[in-house]
Amino acid sequence: MAAALLLGRIAGAVGLLMTGAAIGRAISKAPVRVTAEARKAGWHAGVPLGDRQYRITVRGKWSHKQGEPTVGPGGSRIVAHGDFPKTIDGATEGCLLVRVLKDGAIHHFADGRPLVVQGPGTAEFRINDTDMDDNIGTLEIRITPVL
Ligand SMILES: [Ca+2]
């Protein structure tokens, strides 16, 4: 139990916790779960995807600004632009961004609906925000191969 707690703390410190499949192998059958911390600067790295489609669903809430209501992966209702410290334009402030390293496309959640992304590549996650100090919360991300 103590080892599991310690492992969880270490994974939390780096902002990524993977279960359900071995790290470093492409997901073939079982879903993989990872967590994304709102305060983590940069991309949460490293979920290998095979040459197929994957459905990404998310639970939990976070916020890009302490004092604002916590929200799901769709972020706030405001599309980031101007001086907002966003990662990309055209997605809502504080939404979950998904990048598949290979084609370089960045996907974002709209209204919290599941995303389907195409492998192969490495899936990475982050919040659409670059001012991390006032962020709170964690999202649980589930990545499931589409049959
Ligand atoms: Ca922020």
Image: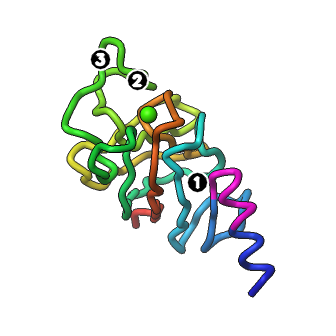
Q: In 3D space, how far apart are the residues under numbered discs 1 and 2 (Cα atoms)?
A: 26 Å
Between disc 1 and disc 2, the foreground one is 2
Picture coordinates of residue 60 (x, y %)?
A: 38, 62
Q: Which residue reaches farthest bottom? A: 1
Residue depicted at 39% across the width and 52% down the height: 62
- Give residue 146's quadrant in the image: bottom left
Q: Secondary structure at mark 1?
A: loop
| Residue toward you, 101 or 34 | 34
Residue at numbered disc 2:
88
Amino acid type, residue under disc 2 in the picture: Ile
CB of mark 1 within 8 Å of CB of mark 2?
no
**How far across and down, in percent of the image, does residue 47 sit?**
61, 53
Q: Secondary structure at mark 3?
A: loop
| Residue positioned 39% across, 43% down in the render | 66
1 vs 3, front mark: 3
- Asked if the residues shown at circle 1 and circle 3 are in contact, with their CB atoms under 8 angstroms apart, the answer is no
| Chain-order first, disc 3 or disc 2 | 3
Please state the extent of the stretch shown in magenta in the rendering. 9-16
- Residue under circle 3? 81
What residue did someone put label 1 on? 50
Q: Is residue 9 above or below residue 90?
A: below
- Residue 82 part of the magenta-drawn span: no
Q: Which of the marked residues, 1 or 2, is nearer the chain's N terminus? A: 1
Q: Earlier in the sequence, mark 1 or mark 3?
A: 1
Q: Amino acid at mark 3?
A: His
